[in-house]
Image: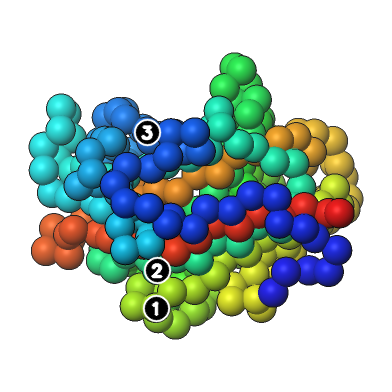
Amino acid sequence: MVPEGYKLVWEENFAYEGALKEEDWTVAVGERWANNEQQAYTDRLSNVCVKDGMLHLVSLKETQGIREYTSGRVSTAGKHSWQYGYFEICARLPKGRGSWPAIWMLPDSIGNGRHWPECGEIDIMEHVGRMEDKIWFSLHSERHNHTRKDTKQYTVIKDYEKVCSEFHTYGMEWTEEYIEFYVDGEKACVFRKSDDTEDQSESAWPFDQPFYLILNIAVGGGLGGEIDENALPYHMEVEYVKIYQRL
């Protein structure tokens, strides 16, 4: 359900075959990632490809450099970014302990030397296979992030059924005053800039700048946890991405 007053400004329906369009997407390649994740990301079609009208991200048990697993991570970094709007992604999530798929956003400023978590991070959807029926919605900032134990967390975890067997839409309305998350058009939670009555500075709310979109499956790591190799390959399918902004 698109909120009233928004106009479609960009969409990807994956109506082609093979590699992602280079003019729209950046495919990550590398072996060293944060959070003790165990995958190497590649641009091989076995990990990232478009077929049957969908984007397929696949994690495999195979050695790549220092890693024993490969996976897919794609983003619009350097191609498209947005400040505010309504974002909707239709996806079916992978099943299996150790999988850690996410639909999330980082700011353009991280590419210009601004470090995490100062730069900010928006997690439209996170899921881990060890907690199959739960979806995580989070905001990260210098003041509010998971590495701090003495401050408020902008994270909500809610129960949903069949996220690994059926397609669901994951939505976000992002404005100057709040960021609200949706699943299948139903509100999951909302975080407001005014929620922090002590600090409304950029250190607590760095979300008034352009961000780009990321889709990926991490393997293991701090949140993904123990890897069940019998569950591999992990397979995430994305049917579409639609982004709307105010008229």
The quarter of the picture where residue 143 lies is: top right
Give the residue furthest to the front: 16
- Residue 75 pos. (x, y %): 48, 40
Q: Looking at the image, which is closer to me, 246 or 226?
A: 246
Q: How far apart are the two marked residues, 3 and 2, measured between alpha carbons?
A: 21 Å
Label 3, on which residue? 28
* Neighbour tally class for label 1: few under 14, some 14-19, many 20 plus, Cα within 10 Å: few
Are discs 1 and 2 less than 8 Å apart at CB? yes
Label 1, on which residue? 166
Residue at x 34% of width, y 78% of height: 165
Q: Earlier in the sequence, mark 3 or mark 2?
A: 3
Query: The disc labelled 3 sits on which kind of residue?
Result: Ala
Looking at the rendered structure, which numbered label has been put on residue 66? Answer: none
Q: Earlier in the sequence, mark 1 or mark 2?
A: 2
Query: In the rendered view of the protein, which quadrant contains the C terminus?
Result: bottom right
Query: In the rendered view of the protein, which quadrant contains the N terminus?
Result: bottom right
Residue at x 63% of width, y 29% of height: 108
The quarter of the picture where residue 187 lies is: bottom right
Q: Earlier in the sequence, mark 1 or mark 3?
A: 3
Label 2, on which residue? 92
- Residue 135 pos. (x, y %): 50, 67
Residue at x 85% of width, y 41% of height: 199
Q: Looking at the image, which is closer to me, 15 or 230?
A: 15
Q: Of helix, strand and loop, which one carries label 1?
A: loop
Q: Taking the image as drawn, is residue 22 in sight?
A: yes
